[in-house]
Amino acid sequence: MSVTKKDVAYIAELARLKFGDTEMETMTVELNNILHYIDKLNEVDTEGVQPLSSIHDESNVLRADIEKTSISTDQVLLNAPDRQDRFFKVPKVIG
């Protein structure tokens, strides 16, 4: 399979990209190199190879879910530079 400049122009249009002539040529070569590499990968014999979701055999190590008491709202608000009722008061960010 080979990619032409027409193919690259179509893909660029779909992605809303604009390429100059030099960039179009570069993208055509690079996409063809990628497809050539994929063709090489397709030639590899993978018969009997189990699919992997990860290269590691580790599984999640989870801690026990132990209920603990939490600090109160008043204790949390002691760290607030400014507060209003039960809430942190911060400067307005959105105009």
Image: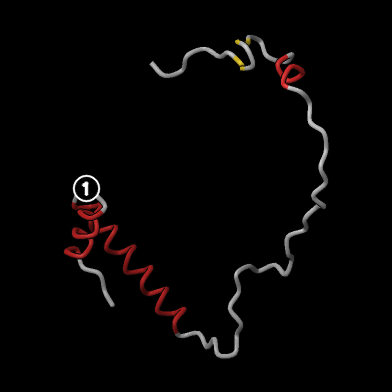
Say few, some or many: other residues with alpha carbon within 10 Å of mark 1 (under 14 / 14 to 19 / 20 or more): few
- In the rendered image, the quadrant that contains the N terminus is bottom left
Front residue (pair 29, 59): 59
Residue 86 horizontal/vertical position (percent):
64, 16
Q: Is residue 51 left or right of residue 29?
A: right
Q: Is residue 21 left or right of residue 69?
A: left
Residue 53 horizontal/vertical position (percent):
60, 70
Q: Residue at coordinates 73% horizontally, 20% vertically from top-left? A: 76
- In the rendered image, the quadrant that contains the C terminus is top left
Residue 2 horizontal/vertical position (percent):
26, 74
Front residue (pair 41, 53): 53
Q: Is residue 19 left or right of residue 76?
A: left
Q: State the residue lying farthest toward the left.
A: 6
Q: Identify the residue position indicated by label 1 in the image.
A: 18
31 relative to 74, above or below: below
Residue 26 horizontal/vertical position (percent):
29, 57
* Amino acid type indicated by mark 1: Lys
Q: State the residue lying farthest toward the bottom.
A: 47
Q: Residue at coordinates 24% horizontally, 48% vertically from top-left? A: 17
